[in-house]
Image (spheres, grey):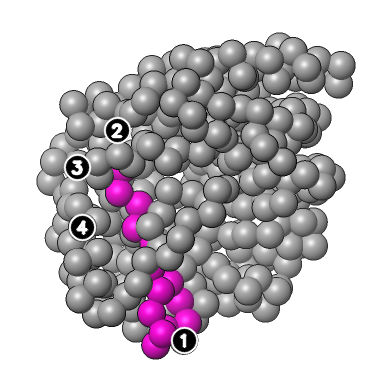
């Protein structure tokens, strides 16, 4: 199905990142170093199960074929398994993924798969338990690693692992990560540290370009793969000697935004055209009944005509994103 959601730069949108909470129980140095603090009004409510069902139905009817549930930490919602099942009711959604810190993975991943989850991203920024604790504020390394094993046991054929690339923290650890994925079908994705409103000092101290990793991979015989239309922004590399893959997400690279294929809806029902945009378009008033689908799709389509060609991170403009849990990364 051809996407009905297109912008003025001939980009089509097949991929929805849907945040279902901005609450997180980790305190990662690059995201929530002081722990979770409610944004703005404290009496807000996150999207309900019915609202989630309606918004994903509208996107699917317009050609969206992939949905990623994000947070905060999405598994903190008590109805998380029900949310998975509700999204998977729609057969047009071919891929349903979640990005998680892995806190509840070992306990719940089998039920998530049974409910219809098809893909899994787990955040692990270090393979050293002590450094993992220092980065996340949680001594949960072995628990998260056990969760990845549980995901394979539950039937996932591949797991993606997200690693935020940071100078003097983990950027020298490529070989350690490569050894880990030699016999494991893990796509390890190095994500360049991005500047946010609250993280300017951290960015200046620890940002390093993914080109450093890419150059090393190419020298070692890794080969870049083709990208599918509903894939995320990672440049993915494979090697015949490895069961795993390496992905690089480099938002500061020239033309990064040219292949943008994803839209974001926040946990309070706002459409965000860019992670680093200046505002959001409220959809919530059109999520209250099933008979507002056409109007909902029309509002999303009209909003896309205002989507800019690129982010402005190079100019230090991080938009309204104070931290990466705010919209869902």
Circle 2 sits in a helix, a strand or a loop, which is it?
Answer: loop
Which circle, 4 or 1, is nearer the viewer? 4
Circle 1 sits in a helix, a strand or a loop, which is it?
Answer: loop
Query: Which quadrant of the rendered structure holds the N terminus?
Result: top right
- Whichever of labels 2 and 3 marks the residue nearer the N terminus, that label is 2
Residue 112 numbered mark, or none: none
Q: Is residue 312 above or below residue 284?
A: below
- 94 lies left or right of 269: right
Which circle, 1 or 2, is nearer the viewer? 1
| Residue 198 appears in the picture as rendered | no
Residues shaded magenta: 237-251
Residue drawn at 38 percent across, 37 percent down:
258
Q: Nearer the viewer, residue 252 or 70?
A: 252
- Whichever of labels 4 and 1 marks the residue nearer the N terminus, that label is 1
Q: Position of residue 165 (x, y in %)?
A: 27, 56
Circles 4 and 3, Cβ within 8 Å, touching? The answer is no
Q: Position of residue 206 (x, y in %)?
A: 17, 50
Which circle, 4 or 3, is nearer the viewer? 4
Q: Quadrant of residue 248?
A: bottom left
Which circle, 3 or 1, is nearer the viewer? 1
Circle 4 sits in a helix, a strand or a loop, which is it?
Answer: helix
Q: Which residue is mark 4?
A: 211
Give the crowd class for mark 2: few <14, some 14-19, many >=20 residues within 10 Å: many
Q: Which residue is mark 1?
A: 183
Which circle, 4 or 2, is nearer the viewer? 4
- 207 lies left or right of 249: left
Residue 202 numbered mark, or none: 3
Residue drawn at 57 percent across, 71 percent down:
158
Residue drawn at 20 percent across, 71 percent down:
216
Query: Which quadrant of the rendered structure holds the C terminus?
Result: top left
Q: Which residue is mark 2?
A: 196
Circle 3 sits in a helix, a strand or a loop, which is it?
Answer: helix
């Amino acid at each position: 199905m051809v996407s009905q959601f297109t912008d003025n730069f001939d980009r089509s949108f097949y991929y929805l990142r849907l945040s279902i909470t901005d609450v997180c129980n980790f305190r990662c140095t690059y995201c929530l170093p002081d722990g979770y603090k409610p944004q703005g009004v404290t009496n807000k409510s996150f999207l309900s199960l019915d609202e989630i069902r309606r918004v994903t139905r509208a996107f699917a009817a317009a050609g969206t074929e992939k949905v990623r549930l994000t947070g905060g930490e999405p598994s903190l919602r008590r109805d998380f398994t029900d949310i998975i099942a509700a999204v998977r009711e729609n057969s047009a959604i071919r891929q349903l993924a979640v990005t998680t810190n892995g806190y509840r993975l070992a306990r719940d991943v089998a039920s998530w798969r049974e409910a219809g989850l098809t893909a899994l991203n787990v955040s692990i920024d270090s393979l050293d338990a002590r450094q993992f604790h220092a980065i996340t504020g949680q001594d949960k390394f072995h628990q998260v690693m056990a969760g990845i094993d549980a995901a394979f046991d539950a039937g996932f054929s591949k797991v993606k692992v997200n690693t935020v690339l940071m100078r003097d923290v983990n950027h020298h650890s490529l070989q350690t990560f490569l050894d880990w994925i030699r016999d494991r079908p893990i796509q390890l994705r190095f994500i360049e540290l991005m500047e946010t409103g609250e993280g300017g000092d951290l960015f200046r101290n620890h940002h390093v370009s993914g080109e450093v990793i890419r150059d090393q991979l190419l020298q070692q015989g890794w080969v870049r793969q083709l990208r599918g239309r509903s894939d995320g922004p990672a440049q993915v590399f494979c090697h015949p000697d490895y069961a795993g893959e390496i992905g690089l997400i480099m938002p500061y690279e020239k033309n990064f935004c040219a292949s943008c294929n994803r839209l974001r809806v926040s946990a309070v029902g706002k459409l965000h055209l860019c992670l680093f945009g200046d505002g959001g378009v409220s959809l919530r008033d059109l999520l209250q009944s099933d008979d507002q689908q056409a109007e909902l799709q029309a509002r999303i389509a009209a909003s896309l005509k205002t989507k800019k060609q690129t982010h402005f991170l190079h100019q230090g403009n991080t938009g309204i994103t104070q931290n990466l849990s705010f919209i869902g990364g």
